[in-house]
Image (cartoon, helix red, strand yellow):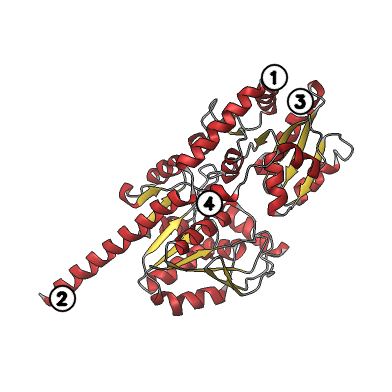
Amino acid sequence: MRLLHVTHQYPPAIGGSEKYIADLSEELVARGHQVDVFTSCSLDYHTWKDELRPRERMNGVNVYRFRSMRRTGFVWRVLHWSLGQYWRTRSRWYEPLILFGGGPLCPGMFAAMLSRLPQYDLVHLNCLVYGHVAYGYLAARWRHVPVIVTPHTHASQEVTYGIGHQLDVLHGSDHIIAVTEAERDFLLGLGLDPWRVTTAGNGLRPESYPMRDAMTCRQRLGLPEDAFVMLFLGRQVEYKGLGMALEAFIVLRKCYPHTYFLVVGPETDYSRQLFTRHDDRPGVINLGTVSDDVRMDALNACDCLVLPSAGEAFGIVFLEAWIVGKPVIGPRTAAISTVIRDGQDGWLVPLDDPLTIVTALKRWIDTPALARQMGESGRQRVLQRYTRARVADVIEGVYLRTLRARQRVQAAQRHSLCT
């Protein structure tokens, strides 16, 4: 197949949805398909600053990047104002301003889609919350190319699915890919046809996550060999529960002084302000943005992953912890409750309840064998259910069914013309 994947950002940009589309693209290329990616030149969706080269080939995938309008303070104010007006009135007059404020606004990408879409069998749009999906969908419909969408909806965040153009895309696309059963159920609740919504999940290449000697990794990271290490892995924003994880660490360290809190991921204004208040707190190590190699050291060095995020559509970092045998703590939300099996491969905790996290961590500290058992349970689940190959099997099947359905419609139309 000749496939076009359209996404807001693509690696080396960091993010779960960026990794999702990159892994899928590379797996499909390995199966002999042609995959081109249209994306922005940005590494940071907060600014959409153009930082990456316009074209490159990455692991067999042709990546075309387009310049986007910068998201300045004025643009953010427009976004916040227009969203406020939209939620108050539900008037579609505000949607152009929401698209303007949300971005990425890439006129070159839209023009390229209009001119080049007939070259492709199908277009797959990734991450509904951003504007590229709106104009990508419009271009595909104008050029009569089938459309698949992976929305990455967050049921608790209506901005990821509830604006008029987003609902138009969901209801008008040929097929929707959900990453969890909870997301699929939610999409069906919006009135989507069950036959047009498939759950594929997220996946890893297990061979890309080698299990390393934990003590060696700790030496490289400056961690004591006998420490109990909590790992927070992800962008350091408030909604991912960084503050709650830090609160849990502070309480836990009073009882278990050998506890360490290792933070890995891009820093933000929020995290810098948060850690300024804890500059001299012992046991906190914030590495910020790191290389893939250091990221692997952190995963192997830790005892567990703690990510009590309020806004995860799936949480691929849970898979990354499991594949190296580490148990996890995640939020008791509809989406994550279908990923983490509470008490088997991790613990589910209420949002904004650090003491529940402390209780869960105490059980692992007091019973290390339980932590190892839960981590191994998670590893086996990844190998059985969440490999990149298995996810690609499902999505490849969706592509083929969509194309066959389109061919049947076209054949019926030709037949009606002849008769």
Residue kind at label 3, given as amino acid type: Leu
Residue beneath disc 1: 366
Mark 2 vs mark 1: in front: 1
The residue at the point 56 percent across, 63 percent down is 99
The relative height of residue 319 versus residue 395 in the rendered view (above or below) is above
- Identity of the residue furthest to the bottom in this view: 115
| Residue 246 horizontal/vertical position (percent) | 75, 35
Question: Foreground: 416 or 396?
Answer: 396
| Residue 280 horizontal/vertical position (percent) | 89, 37
The residue at the point 76 percent across, 36 percent down is 261
Give me the C-alpha separation between circle 3 and circle 1: 12 Å
Among numbered discs 2 and 3, the one appearing first in the sequence: 3
Residue beneath disc 2: 417
User: In the image, is 384 to the left or to the right of 333?
Assistant: left
The relative height of residue 373 versus residue 162 in the rendered view (above or below) is above
The residue at the point 35 percent across, 55 percent down is 397
Among numbered discs 3 and 4, the one appearing first in the sequence: 4
Residue kind at label 4, given as amino acid type: Thr
Mark 1 burial class by Cα count in 10 Å: few <14, some 14-19, many 20+: few
Residue 252, which numbered label?
3
Among numbered discs 4 and 1, the one appearing first in the sequence: 4
| Residue 406 horizontal/vertical position (percent) | 28, 65
